[in-house]
Amino acid sequence: MQDLSEILSFLPCSTPDRWVENALENQEVMLIDHAHCEKKAAATALSLMHRYVEHLDVQHKMSRLAREELRHYEQVLAIIKKRGMKFGALSASRYASGMRDKVRGNEPGKLVDTLIVGAFIEARSCERFAKLAPFLAPDLQKFYLSLLKSEARHYQDYLHLAQRYSETDIEPRVAMFAEIEKGLIESSDETFRFHSGPVS
């Protein structure tokens, strides 16, 4: 898949094998957190639509993205229900807050950085779906593989919008966030989550 190859080149590192082991050992938590991630992704897209009303391409791209993320949310909820699992709240991982900590407060820097962070989140999700899929039950494997195309498009949309609204080349900002992302993905976490680092 060409989009996946592009994503693997964009990300600063691959998901550690230990995290994959954590996910397979904690599939109930993985699915519940995955559902929350889809809901948060939709909320982020809607927030951008509210904040940047004057940017019509943001409105268009984020509207579609929010619809797709909510559809994914519904699909994960259906899997959770089918498996007889109890859905509830989970504490958030440090990943998203760690990435957003360096987002600039001024415009257009704030918009550009928020979009770059969105690109990393979508790209990492796509990479993890692909890495997990071979080890999952057939129904879940099929579902995770079905998400790859839309997640890859979301990553591309975020990155293209970031360059569209940046007054300078975004590569230095992408490189800075890549270093942050690498640290979050490779360093150990105390609690397993879909975007956590490996748990010992």
Image (spheres, grey):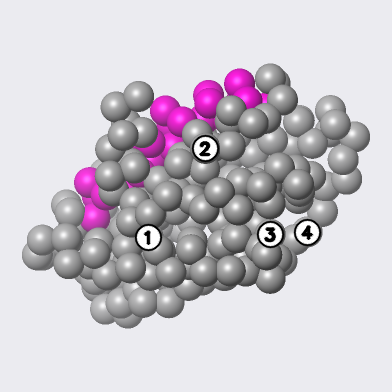
**Residue identified by numbered label 3:** 192
**Residue identified by numbered label 4:** 89
Left/right placement of residue 189 relative to residue 126 reads right
Circle 3 sits in a helix, a strand or a loop, which is it? loop
For the residue carrying disc 2, how many other residues have a C-alpha within 10 Å: few (<14), some (14-19), or many (20+)? Answer: some
Please say if 63 is above or below 36.
above
Please state which amino acid type lies under the numbered disc 3: Phe
**Residue identified by numbered label 1:** 117
Please state which amino acid type lies under the numbered disc 1: Val
Task: First in sequence, mark 3 or 4: give its number.
Answer: 4
Task: First in sequence, mark 1 or 4: give its number.
Answer: 4
Who's the residue at 66% across and 47% down the image? 21
Who's the residue at 75% across and 61% down the image? 90
Depth order, front residue of 103/58: 103
Magenta region = 140-162
For the residue carrying disc 4, how many other residues have a C-alpha within 10 Å: few (<14), some (14-19), or many (20+)? Answer: few
Q: Position of residue 168 (x, y in %)?
A: 9, 65
Circle 4 sits in a helix, a strand or a loop, which is it? loop
Please say if 12 is above or below 94.
above
Please state which amino acid type lies under the numbered disc 2: Lys
Disc number for residue 131: 2
Screen quadrant of the N terminus? top left
Who's the residue at 43% across and 77% down the image? 101
Please state which amino acid type lies under the numbered disc 4: Ala
As measured in the structure, the alpha-carbon distance from the residue carrying label 2 to the one carrying label 1 is 21 Å
Circle 2 sits in a helix, a strand or a loop, which is it? helix
